Image: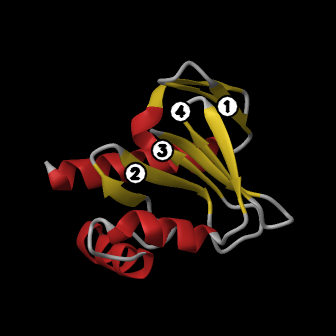
Amino acid sequence: MYNYLKRTMDYKLFISKGNNVLIEDMPIQTFFNKLLKRELTDLTSRERITKRVIHLKSKIPIYVDKDTMFMCIKSYRLKNSFYINYFSIKSYEYIDNEVIVHFLNRSSLKTGKKHSFQAQMKKCRLILDYLN
């Protein structure tokens, strides 16, 4: 199960999957398109239909399947893009303006994007409510 995706300034893609972190030299859009291909769609189509159906304007969570929905903490269009898999979150806690996310594989991640995280959690719940 994916935990998070992070693209660095040198355009390397860090992919946290299980207890491993893979480093790939590919755009994050290519990674998303490879995942979504199994669902017979691509990133542009998934974003467009999610915006239309759920009535979201920006920073669309990327729903892939029942185990993977990436919350957009920092958009893939930016240099330091950052996504967290909603389904891999065991718990989270707020400390001042930071969020500490605890994953199902017992790893943790600290991010200073509290407001983005809160907004994405709401958007993910809207998507799940629609799907159920």
Q: Which residue is mark 3?
A: 85
Left or right relative to 14: residue 18: left
Left or right relative to 122: residue 2: right
* 8 vs 28: above or below: above
Spatial distance from mark 1 to mark 2, Cα to Cα?
17 Å
Q: Which residue is mark 1?
A: 109
Observer-nearest residue: 57 or 41?
41
Check if mark 1's residue and mark 2's residue have beta carbons within 8 Å: no
Check if mark 3's residue and mark 2's residue have beta carbons within 8 Å: yes
Q: Counting other residues with Cα less than 10 Å from the Cα at mark 4, is it few (<14), some (14-19), or many (20 or more)?
A: some
Q: Which residue is mark 4?
A: 18
Instruction: Look at label 3 and name its amino acid.
Output: Asn
Q: Counting other residues with Cα less than 10 Å from the Cα at mark 3, is it few (<14), some (14-19), or many (20 or more)?
A: many
Q: What is the image's colouring? A: secondary structure
Q: Which of disc 2 and disc 1 is earlier in sequence?
A: 2
Q: Which residue is mark 2?
A: 69
Instruction: Look at label 1 and name its amino acid.
Output: Leu
Spatial distance from mark 1 to mark 4, Cα to Cα?
13 Å
Instruction: Look at label 4 and name its amino acid.
Output: Gly
Left or right relative to 74: residue 127: left
